[in-house]
Amino acid sequence: MSNYDVIIIGSGHNGLVTGCYLAKAGYSVLVLERRENIGGAVCTETMFQSKEYPGGFRMDVGSSVHIMIHQTGILEELELEKYGLEYIEMDPIMSYPLPPGQSRKGVIHFYRDLERTLESIAQVASEDVENYRDFVEFWGRVNEGVLKAFMVPPSGKNIVTELAKGQIRGGSMFKKGEQAAGLQKIFSSYGKVVDNAFENPWMKAALTWFAAQSGPTPDHPATGDFAGWQSMLHQSGAKHPKGGSGMLTQAMANFLEAHGGTIQTSSPVENIIIKNGEAKGVRTAEREDFFADTIVSNAHVQTTMMKMVGREHLDSSLYEKVENINVGNGFGMVIRCAVEELPEYTACPDDPDVHNGMQLLAPSTQYMRNAIGDYTKGLPPEDPAVLAMTFSKIDPEVAPDGGHTLFAWAQWHPYELNNGEHWDDIREREAQKIYDVVTRYAPNMEGKLIDWYIQSPLDIERKHAMPRGNVMHVEMSFDQMFMFRPIPEMSEYKTPIENLYLSSASCHPGGGVFGAAGHNAAQVILKDLKKQKWFF
């Protein structure tokens, strides 16, 4: 039996952010991680060791591109560069090679620098140069306020109030006379926002596919800012940690331990110990008990409340609300490939920058609609849209001499299949479809696969304990954002169980390598602990 000030369940990056802030404030923190490796979905593992490649390849097993966290101040406040974190700029942030089979060749690069981006757009879609400038300017103003709203607990009032608060903090969100039109864009679907803003079909495909990474389909209402967040890329850029995505959580672990914290791996928490409505500790699968004044769960909200807490400790109506949270029907799947060489895209075979960032392989918006159509029928997409990443180009530490890494993420893969098939039986077939998209764009990749690590929706669920393979935990739809996430009663990181808090992507503001949920939870907890000290 061990006693701490705070126990954190799970070592995902949000949980570690919470732990770092609490340890920094002087509290004794224990993090219990169910897997052998820390980091949750921000983790890098060595794979594919062989005689030819004895050191293997460094493969991210979850998130890879770090964007949002660079807009939060978390990295600077925790001074994580002192604990081993070094970032490599991805510039261009992303590129759109023109689809195969076109008479025209070329690529659209989206650099951190706006003017360089406009120059690249001019080479392929000159009609959209000023449209893109206007788009970035409009959404940049909007998102100054939205970002600040993301970095505080939601108020519990309506979303218009939350945006208005962000506007007061960040300056005018809309130009005079544009309020109604501006709000209409915010509450539109991102597909409509992109379609209305641009003329060129390749620009529309590129920006729609990138916006789709947040989860909802392009026709989903009140998702306009999923496209509008493009504006923020020109402020913070996108980065990848040297040595792999997991170096972020390794640095957080180093910080935590340097401030007296403890991390224990291979310790899955089975139950939260509750007495008289108060969380007192946790019990692991090995029947080991740990006690603390404060318990923080970085696990999925349904796992936390329905399994670790249990029906017997919750009001029946609240249990039902948690059970009915929309987790969705899967999200996507990814192949992590060790390859002999990098893709040589037929549209831009000698381009020196295309491998520096994400590569958007989606020929058209109709192509994406077709994939979504398969998804809504409960079928894997016949022709998946793909986002390729080639980090060995900018970081030689992740691949040995003579090898490269190629990650290819595809979307709209249903967790629950309606054709009687099972993911364990079709995972390699569907992985091959994704790789085939890469070879259609870059025929040189045919036969260049050394090995791969496949993550189907079912594999993602098993690896990361993300129900139904949703990498955002909970659907990022309007009815599950801000004060509605995960449910209104727990939107401010507190639960009905006294001294039990939430800090995962199930909470506001949601998923991605952001850290905001962990940051906000820490501020709530520190405020509560300060009150307790005052009264006791």
Image (cartoon, rainbow, N blue to C red):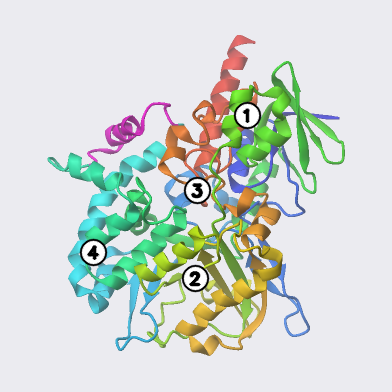
Q: How many numbered marks appear?
A: 4
Identify the image quadrant of residue 462.
bottom right
Q: Are marks 3 and 2 in contact (CB under 8 Å)?
A: no
Sequence-wise first label, 3 or 4? 4
Q: Residue type at mark 4?
A: Phe
Q: Position of residue 276 (x, y in %)?
A: 73, 15
Sequence-wise first label, 3 or 2? 2
**Separation of marks 1 and 4 at Cα, in angstroms:** 45 Å
Asked if residue 156 is among those painted magenta in the image, a careful observer would answer yes
**Separation of marks 4 and 2 at Cα, in angstroms:** 24 Å
Q: Position of residue 383 (x, y in %)?
A: 49, 73
Which numbered disc, 1 or 3, marks the residue closer to the eye?
Answer: 1
Q: Which residue is mark 3?
A: 514
Callout 3: SS: loop
Q: Is residue 503 visible?
A: yes
Q: Residue type at mark 2?
A: Pro
In the image, what residue occupies the spot 51% across and 51% down?
512
Q: Position of residue 432 (x, y in %)?
A: 60, 77
Identify whether 320 is placed above or below 434. Answer: above
Q: Which mark is residue 272?
A: none
Sequence-wise first label, 4 or 2? 4
Q: Which residue is mark 1?
A: 319
Callout 2: SS: loop
- Range covered by the magenta-colored residues: 154-173
Callout 4: SS: loop
Q: Residue type at mark 3?
A: Phe
Q: Residue type at mark 1?
A: Tyr
Foreground residue, 322 or 80?
A: 322
Q: Are marks 4 and 2 in contact (CB under 8 Å)?
A: no
